[in-house]
Amino acid sequence: MRLAQSRRWLTLISPILLIVAWELAVQAGILNRRFVPQPSQVLATLASMAQSGELWTNLGVSMVRIALGFLLGAALGVVLGLIIGISPTASAVLRPIMSLVNPIPKILLIPFVALAFGYNEQARVLALAISLMPIILLDTAAAVDRIDPRYFEVARGYGASRWDTFWTVALPAAMPSIVNTLRLGLAYSLTLIVGVELFGAQTGIGQLAWRAGDVFAVNRLGAGIVAIAITGWLLTVGIDLITPGLIPWSPRPVERRAEESPLARAVRIWWRATRPFSFTAATIPVLLGTAIAAYQGHFNIGLFVLALVGSVAFQAGTNMINDYYDFTKGADNERSLGIGGAIQRGELTPRQVFWGGIAAFALGSVLGLIIVSQTGPFILVLGMFSVLAGFFYTAGPAALAYVGLGEITVFIFMGPVIVIGAYYVQAMHAGWDTLIASLPIGFMVAAILHANNLRDLEADRAVGKRTLATLLGRGRANIEYYILVGGAYGALLVSILLGVSPWYTLITGLTLPLALALTRRVSVSTDPPELNPVLRKTAQLHTRFGLLLTAGWVLALFLNQLFGR
């Protein structure tokens, strides 16, 4: 255990020592500051660029180019690689060509594409796609080659066509290797973008770095390199997080669990008591409101971070206060599904959970007051009502959740209020357009709560807890779920038709299959264990819908900047 802890400390300390030594060497004149960036000045330059918006503009434009080029190259590479893997004829035709193209340094392909197609955005995207495709194609074909031939024989024995074999054998079996290849390809695209933006680009993080190098602005060059490095790390972490959901059948390494220290145990217990799985309900509206403001030309990273952390703190406080009052009122017990459970497991006393909730509210309030000092009293009013709604959601003799007002409260305060608040923090004003744009998130977050109430309908009725589900009855409560989920898509469509939301937000349609599957599940299920997955998957639907909705606004922002609209 001590050896493992020592290694963890070394992992943390070694890069810090390197940066400190680098800083001291530059300050002492051992390294010439005219040619070697100084870490402290690089960070200061990076902060200045972030504050002015220059960093986000250039990084955003580059990420749009990367996204379009990567998606095109990956789609062609994976599909053709799978075809090569299962078709000897396709392999005989395509594999030699790709094997010849792959060793060519990709930086040499970029000017060729630029000369052939022009110095425009389409050529830059195409250059990225052409550079990435051979690598992904050959790795995908190799992944299919490694599949045990007996799987294909079994599929053919059951009468599977070549198309069936593609979808049911080749693709699932090769997916772990494909995802790893895509992970490496995405990291490689960050290298390629620097070369792509050398040819005729006016904006982009690579172009920023090139211009800085041309005039020996080494600290600015270093800031560009750090931005690229952090972006690559975040992309890698993101892929690692979503991979288990994409390929749940992939084998996972078994890690030996070290003995837990008292401090680590306390942190784990309190973290679990906050119900962190619910934090997406607090973060998605902040991301959306900020994206809308950025689309309209307003963005301050410091205020964004304060709003995001404050929103999560209020959510944590609400969760713990709710756990306390649901326990004291008898609504939650050891047999309840989906609760925080710290009280029921004996990890924390009810009093500790209560004061933990108050502390989280206090933290959120302090952060809110800092925002108020920068933006004015409007945020103070929103914050006060939000705290009251969170506390009295389950507190008091007429708690909102106990008198059928739960969904309405959540719709208002976890949808429009947070979105409008996050927007106002950036833009210092808010109008009807922001309210209209926030409605889809309000519908979707209310659907999470209603899924919870559908599951607990009989248990809530037994303890006298009046929710809309208990008041309406199973049949009409199911209809309410359909309305809430469908309302999110309907409200978004209306918002687009009114010209409030950009057309790119229609990418939320990718979540429709999950939404339809959930409504079918609700229509045929009544037992709590059967409905528990509906709650979990409705929360996933909210997260995916919200992230795609935010991505639509961000995509519209950067495409407008990219094409000068």
Image (tube, rainbow, N blue to C red):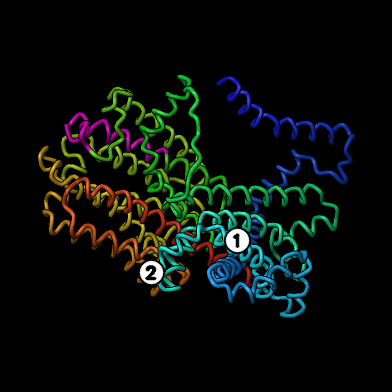
Image spot of residue 17 (x, y percent): 73, 30
Q: Position of residue 447 (x, y in %)?
A: 28, 54
Is the residue marked by circle 2 packed among few (<14), some (14-19), or many (20+) residues within 10 Å? many
Q: Residue at x 36, y 28 (%)?
A: 356
- The mark that comes first in sequence, 2 or 1, is 1
User: Residue visible at 64% across and 69% down?
Assistant: 129
Which disc number belongs to residue 550?
Answer: none
Magenta stretch: dominant secondary structure = helix
Relative to 261, say whether 23 is above or below. Answer: below
Please tell me how many numbered marks the rendered image carries. 2
Q: Secondary structure at mark 1?
A: helix
Closest to the observer, 425 or 562: 562
Q: Give the label, 2 or 1, closer to the camera.
A: 1
Q: Which residues are magenta?
A: 313-336
To which residue does mark 2 refer? 495
The residue singled out by tag 1 in the image is 142
As measured in the structure, the alpha-carbon distance from the residue carrying label 2 to the one carrying label 1 is 46 Å
Residue drawn at 78 percent across, 72 percent down:
111
Q: Quadrant of the N terminus?
A: top right
- Quadrant where the C terminus is found in the figure: bottom right
Q: Helix or strand or loop: what does disc 2 sit on? A: helix
The answer to whether residue 440 of the structure is visible from this angle is yes
Q: Identify the amino acid type marked 2.
A: Ser
Q: Amino acid at mark 1?
A: Ala
> Residue 367: horizontal and vertical position, in percent?
47, 37
Q: Which residue is located at x 18 percent, y 35 percent?
A: 331
Q: Can residue 423 be seen from the camera position used here? A: no
Residue 229 forms part of the magenta stretch: no
